[in-house]
Amino acid sequence: MLTTVVPGSDGDAAAILSPRFSLPRVAIRRPSLDISSPIIATVALAAIFTGCCVLVLFTTAEPTWLVPTSAASFPTWTAGPLHGLGAGLLNALVPRGGQNYYAMTDGFSGLLIAMTLGYGVVLAGWRTLSMRTIAIAVIALYGVLLLGPPLQLNDVFNYLGYARLGALHGLNPYTHVIAAEQRDPVFVWTSWRHLSSPYGELFTLLTYPLALISLPFAYWILKSVTVLLALTFVWLVYRVARQLGRDPRFAVLLVAINPIMLIYEVGGFHNDPFMLVPAMGAISLLLARRYKLAGAVLMIAISVKFTMVLLLPFLLLAAPDLRRRLQLVAGAALAAVPLVIVSLLAFGFSLPNLSDQSSLITPYSIPNLAGWPLGLGGAAPALIALAGVALVGGVAFAVVRVSQGRYNWLTAAGWCTIALIASLSWLMPWYVVWVLPLAAVAGSRRLRTGALVLTAFLVLTFTPLTGTVLSELNVNVMSGHVGQKASALNQRLENG
């Protein structure tokens, strides 16, 4: 039967759309860039390693603002074995004189941003990398950073200064300041000269033996132990990820090659690995059902840095029943007794000076930035107190949710750690390392996103170029009375 189609009628449209009258299909291939290919991920990992090598070569060549201690003195033993090796490269790429600072600022800012982008590319292609490749890359990265001087800050010399103050000069570092012994050779490289020690008693005691050997030898031992502990910390992240049944490759990469972890934590030789190793060890022991030992090891982490007390309620909730929780508490108590006794014998009733440190303000801390639109001129004391109250309330809420079975305990601990970091008026970039291991093993995509957003925020706010751009725009977040008072306190603690 034939059907007559009248032009312009509905039958016309139907005939056109019928299979008999359909137009031939043309396959169009859209160009795409697959950043998850093994070649791109490997190249990005190699680029991060190259960036660390360039940074070490530049900072060992001659005194620069990237190494604050070099302004006072820059002997070979502080610069490292590569001292002078990069001098030719530095002379070729960086102009002399007044332009040196700006060239180094722009170069370091570009390097930091490029490494952050490379970090994102590696995370996107983590499935294409073998665990063997990742392990070799991490060891190589940390090894090359060990060869360089401490970057950005000189806390490693402050650690040695407090150790020498107590072990060598017989002065309590919790009641005396480094300036009390200005004749000590470490004094010239220290920064917190008029601040009594804010570090945990156990960490201070662990550094005391370094005061009994030569300063160069002590410097390299402390650096080496810090890097070894950082590698141990990464291995514990690997172990915990496997205990939870997660692919350890992503967990290790998220933590180990984070640009802040590399440049500020490992490259700055900060003491967080002394805290993070026992903290992750406690999590691993709990997952292995060794509850008493988990509590004892966590107490060691708290004795190094009180920050890790935040993990205690979540470890308790992770224990399956009351008996296991009591075992964890017993382990913590058994470890606390000798730690308290040793602390009392060594330092009396003196405590770490967290009060002065908590009064300091960094320009781009969350309370300081929040204080501006609120008309407070920055991180006013009332705003800092409010942030502390909000933190306590948030932790209490998270504990309740976990106890009700509505939230994973590792995820809750991670978000509470982010809240802690956001509440601090004295914010340093390497604080992100506190949350990275929790984000790596918790299995929460939102928590991982939060940790990466925090990383990006800290990279941008601590990139020197950001300060330069804001200065050209006449923006100074420390210009208010709150910022000026904090800056004056900072100068007093440094210079007296």
Image: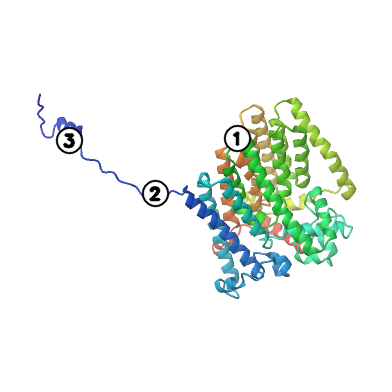
> Residue at label 2?
32
Asked which secondary structure carries label 2, the reply is loop
Label 1 to label 2, Cα distance in Å? 33 Å
Label 2 to label 3, Cα distance in Å? 33 Å
- Tell me where residue 265 sits by quadrant: bottom right
- Tell me where residue 154 sits by quadrant: bottom right
Asked which secondary structure carries label 3, the reply is helix
**Which of the labelled discs sits on residue 106, or is there none?**
none
348 left or right, relative to 293: right
Q: Position of residue 260 (x, y in %)?
A: 62, 53
> Residue at label 3?
21
Q: Residues within 10 Å of mark 2 (few under 14, many from 20)?
A: few
**Looking at the figure, which quarter contains the C terminus?**
bottom right
Give me the residue at 58% from left, 44% from top.
249
Q: Is residue 187 above or below residue 454?
A: below
Three-letter code for the amino acid on which mark 3 is drawn: Phe
> Residue at label 1?
245
Q: Residues within 10 Å of mark 3 (few under 14, many from 20)?
A: few
Three-letter code for the amino acid on which mark 1 is drawn: Gly
Q: Are marks 3 and 1 in contact (CB under 8 Å)?
A: no
Q: Is residue 363 visible?
A: no
Give me the residue at 32% from left, 46% from top.
29
36 left or right, relative to 491: left
Q: Position of residue 411 (x, y in %)?
A: 62, 36
| Depth order, front residue of 42/215 | 42
Q: Are marks 1 and 2 in contact (CB under 8 Å)?
A: no
3 or 1: mark nearer the eye: 1
Q: Is residue 98 visible?
A: yes
**Looking at the figure, which quarter contains the N terminus?**
top left
Q: Earlier in the sequence, mark 1 or mark 2?
A: 2
| Depth order, front residue of 195/145 | 145
| Depth order, front residue of 13/332 | 332
